[in-house]
Image: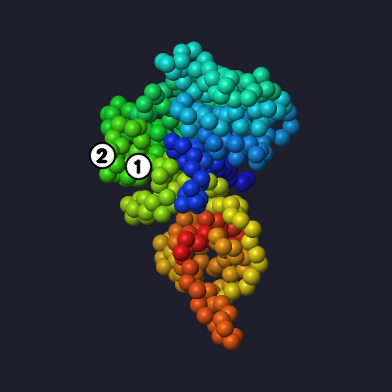
Amino acid sequence: MTAPIAKLSFWGVRGSTPTVDPATWRYGGNTPCLELIAPDGTQFILDCGTGLRMLGSRWGTPNSGGNPETHIFVTHYHWDHIQGIPFFAPLYAENNEFHFYSFRSKFLGRDSLKQVFEAQMALPYFPVDMSAMNAKRKFKEVQGGDSFTIGENKITTRWLNHPQGCLGFRIETPAGTVAYATDNEPGDPKLDESLRELAQGADILINDAQFTPDQLKTTRKGWGHSSWKEGVKLAREVGAKTLVLFHHDPDSTDRTVDSLLRQAREEFDSVFAASEGMVIKLGGTGDDVQAHMPGARTSLRREAQFRAKVSGVTEEGKEFQEETVVRDISLQGALISLQNLPQLQSELQVTMETPGEDGLQSSMLLKGYVVRIDAGAEKGQIAVGVVFTD
């Protein structure tokens, strides 16, 4: 028998507001949206930020036959977590069915989530109203402390510390447990304990890391967010296996997120910074969590053949250097065949030999970050996608 597998995909990872600044390209600028496909085929969507539109444009339901059902958990009603709803194409297809879950807001009262839908699409804010959505929609109110099952999966909710309220969701599948704790700020003893209960022993802990530790103590105190340092502290306390830094600040460049990730990895073994397109698989053989980028998000590449020396750090944290051939290259990045397996999001140095004047060889040194790891075309080789930064 094969081991159960769950697949967690990141469609939006930015907090507060989307950004298209080129300096944020590698991690992505869409606001929160995750997709979890459980081993039994149940599809979960976590939050409905602008990443939801991207998910909708690549819609592929895991269920076969009948009317596909999807379960959508909305953590709270701030704009960055709901603004993708009107642009989610599957909501306009009558054969789809969606179950929405969120809490009753004291500011909205009964049917809070349905009211949010209607308000977003009311005139003059949107050209069509909810009647244009032909998919079946069901709304269920949940509160912190609730527990229920969907298929073979157990769902648990807990309150988090965020202005106007926020829910965290824990999804226990046969392949492993995912704890989703975006938009939380440490400091409230009762809600800190609620967060620990949510994250206890999780295989994947997705935690808010919008601010730096210094910002959290000073200028951003009370804003309802956390830092990489608090995430590491939490992961240690609850015995989480892998920590994912999430809800990146719109003003945080890729270099800034790189720095936060580097600091977190110095204090915790398994840490990733959430990136659009990143996929994490739970279950299967081995204890290590595998994360990869299944496709390129860059511009058109051209085939080429440059001899190169590549140095970096393996997944085990060992430095390596090897000679190889760069085959696909663009102004933004390259696809490189390696024998060593580098860390996703780690830095590589690539020294390429290029033809110079009078047939003489010259060298070009480039620095980049690993954004994609696939099986190589040849046995024993790994295809590594790199985005160049220098």
Which label number is shown at residue 217? 2
Residue at 41% from the left image edge and 65% from the top image edge: 318
Q: Amino acid at mark 1?
A: Phe
Which label number is shown at residue 88? none
Residue 298 vs residue 230, the one in the foreground:
298
Determine the image quadrant of residue 230: top left
Q: Is the C-beta separation of discs 1 and 2 under 8 Å? A: no
Residue 217 vs residue 287, the one in the foreground:
217
Q: Position of residue 25 (x, y in %)?
A: 50, 50
Extreme-left residue of the structure: 218
Residue at 60% from the left image edge and 28% from the top image edge: 86
Left or right: residue 115 versus residue 316 is: right
Determine the image quadrant of residue 126: top right
Placement of 221 over or under 129, stated as above or below? below
Residue at 35% from the left image edge and 32% from the top image edge: 224
Q: Position of residue 232 (x, y in %)?
A: 34, 45
At label 2, counting other C-alpha atoms closer than 10 Å, the crowd grade (few under 14, some 14-19, many 20 or more) is few
Under circle 1, the secondary element is: loop
Quadrant for the N terminus, please.
top right
The answer to whether any part of residue 203 appears in the image is no
Q: Position of residue 48 (x, y in %)?
A: 53, 32
Residue 22 vs residue 177, the one in the foreground:
22
At label 1, counting other C-alpha atoms closer than 10 Å, the crowd grade (few under 14, some 14-19, many 20 or more) is many
Determine the image quadrant of residue 158: top left
Q: Amino acid at mark 2?
A: Lys
Q: Earlier in the sequence, mark 1 or mark 2?
A: 1
The answer to whether any part of residue 64 appears in the image is yes
Q: How many marks?
A: 2
Residue at 47% from the left image edge and 25% from the top image edge: 77
Under circle 2, the secondary element is: helix
